[in-house]
Image: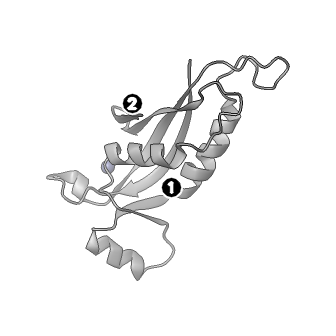
Amino acid sequence: MKVVKIIQWDMGHRVLNHRSVCKGLHGHRYRAEICFKGNLVAEEGSSEEGMVVDFSDIKKLALSLIQDKLDHGFMVWDKDEELMEFFRSSEGHKPVFVPFTPTAENVAKFIFDQLDGKLQDIYGTGLQLHSVKLWETPSSCAIFTRKML
Ligand SMILES: [Zn+2]
């Protein structure tokens, strides 16, 4: 069984080497669909009986690890010298420095890595993060899914 929790935030970025408008500074209303998978909790009388995981547990995690850190922030590739210099010498902004160019694909993987392993499988149901679908615009998204072993 899979369950999905959605979070949204506003964030700026640019794709430095892009051939067109994505090279300029701009922002998006990002939306992440965070999917966990596992068997249903069978423990009678437990708060999570009949669930994969409590939605509020995913929400708490996603708010603290993703939304609080990224909302009204500006994601900056640490190889983007012009922006690194700007954010080093300017205050009042919320830069998020990352070691990758902030495409939807890379941000989806970044979110997956931030969340992966953060919810414990306390009932032994095989609970784990399955995928992150990141919407950069209402019609464009990237999906990062755990590699099958
Ligand atoms: Zn963009």
Say whether mark 2 is within 8 Å of ligand 1: no
Please identify the residue farthest to the left as the structure is shown: 19
Count of residue discs:
2
Seen at 31% across and 60% down, the residue is 25
* Image coordinates for residue 130, horizontal then vertical, percent: 48, 31
In the rendered image, residue 84, in percent from the top left (x then y), is placed at 34, 74
Q: Residue at x 65, y 39 (%)?
A: 120
Callout in the foreground (2, 1): 2
Q: Is residue 46 above or below residue 17?
A: above
Q: Name the quarter where the C terminus is drawn.
A: top left
Nearest the camera: 105 or 68? 105
Write the residue at 31% across / 49% down.
103
Q: Residues within 10 Å of mark 2 (few under 14, many from 20)?
A: few
- Where residue 128 sits, quadrant-wise, is top right
| Neighbour tally class for label 1: few under 14, some 14-19, many 20 plus, Cα within 10 Å | many
Q: Residue at x 54, y 45 (%)?
A: 115
Between 147 and 35, the one nearer to me in the picture:
147
Colour scheme in the image? one colour
Q: Amino acid at mark 1?
A: Leu
Q: Is residue 71 left or right of residue 109?
A: right
Reading the image, the residue beneath label 1 is 70
Secondary element at tag 2: loop
**Distance from the alpha carbon under mark 2 to that under mark 1:** 31 Å
Residue most toward the right?
Answer: 45
Three-letter amino acid code of the residue under disc 2: Leu
Find numbered disc 1 in the image and state the secondary structure of the residue it sits on.
helix
**Marks 2 and 1, the one that precedes in the sequence:** 1
Where does label 2 land, which residue? 149
Residue 121 spot, x, y in % from top left:
65, 33
